[in-house]
Amino acid sequence: MEKRLPEIITSVEHANDYISWIGGCKTEFDVNAAARLIVQFFNLQYFVFGALYRNGEQEHYRYFFGCAPEWCYLYIQNKWYAIDPFIGYALKNSSPILASDIPLTSPGQQRMMASASEYGFRSGIVVPAHSASSSWVGLLYLGTDDEQDRAQQSLDAHRNLMRAFGLELLEWFVCRQHDNSVSDLDLDKLDLKLLCKAQEHATAAEAARELGITLALAESRYRRLYRKLDVPAKRHAVDKAVELGLIRSLL
């Protein structure tokens, strides 16, 4: 019998149950509802989760917000993701930290944080999330409109839970991205296996032999994959497949 989740989180056990439950959520709406309860258990009020992908000159950002819609609009409209100091921290670090401990090094960053404080992020906590099997990096920003002491107390009490929460959100994002990409591109299991072989630097002949198919079929499928991914060659196909979450990074 499936474990029934409480409507209010009152213990670490309940919080862990909700964090584990996120992986099975089918929609962002369900994730958002669970996330709000977890954030409340942390004695905080708002959150933003971002997934970040950087590969050379390519940069991609995906967000979902558990805060005032006006703040979401301002963040995107002003392209603050391009100067967000928390992104820089998350890319190079793994430890949760008070937002106030991350230096603001430009007027743009100062304006961003002044605006954030007007919409509930008077103090906050930055939680990086890194997965060994994905090139995407997660950034969980937890906030409150209360004094700095409240964020500090929450971080001291729930540091490990916050790490687990951020990582679960990242894993959920990566899995949903994989499923959506497979559906949008109309790929099957053989396509994914061929992409994995390409990532391992196997030739079409080697991939065909290892997968038990003919060379003609392997070459035909690779050409079709290049068209679907809109890339000119195998190397580019691997990069695009990792970016779309179709295959996991080997790094």
Image: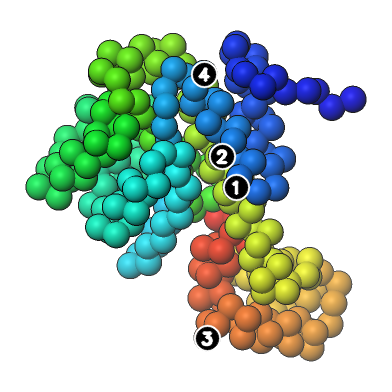
User: Within 10 Å of the Cα at label 1, are there few (<14), some (14-19), or many (20+) other Cα atoms?
Assistant: some
User: Within 10 Å of the Cα at label 4, are there few (<14), some (14-19), or many (20+) other Cα atoms?
Assistant: some
User: Within 10 Å of the Cα at label 3, are there few (<14), some (14-19), or many (20+) other Cα atoms?
Assistant: few
Residue 32: numbered disc: 2
For label 1, the residue is: 28
Q: Are marks 1 and 4 in contact (CB under 8 Å)?
A: no
Q: Nearer the viewer, residue 43 or 98?
A: 43
From the viewer's perspective, is 103 left or right of 91? left
Q: Earlier in the sequence, mark 1 or mark 3?
A: 1
Q: Residue 47: x and y, percent? A: 43, 35
Q: Could you tell me which quadrant the N terminus lies in?
A: top right
Find the distance from the CA under tag 1 to the CA under tag 3.
34 Å
Q: Are marks 1 and 2 in contact (CB under 8 Å)?
A: yes
Find the distance from the CA under tag 3 to the CA under tag 4.
49 Å
Find the distance from the CA under tag 1 to the CA under tag 2.
6 Å
For label 4, the residue is: 41
Height in image: 19 above or below 244? above
From the viewer's perspective, is 7 left or right of 51? right
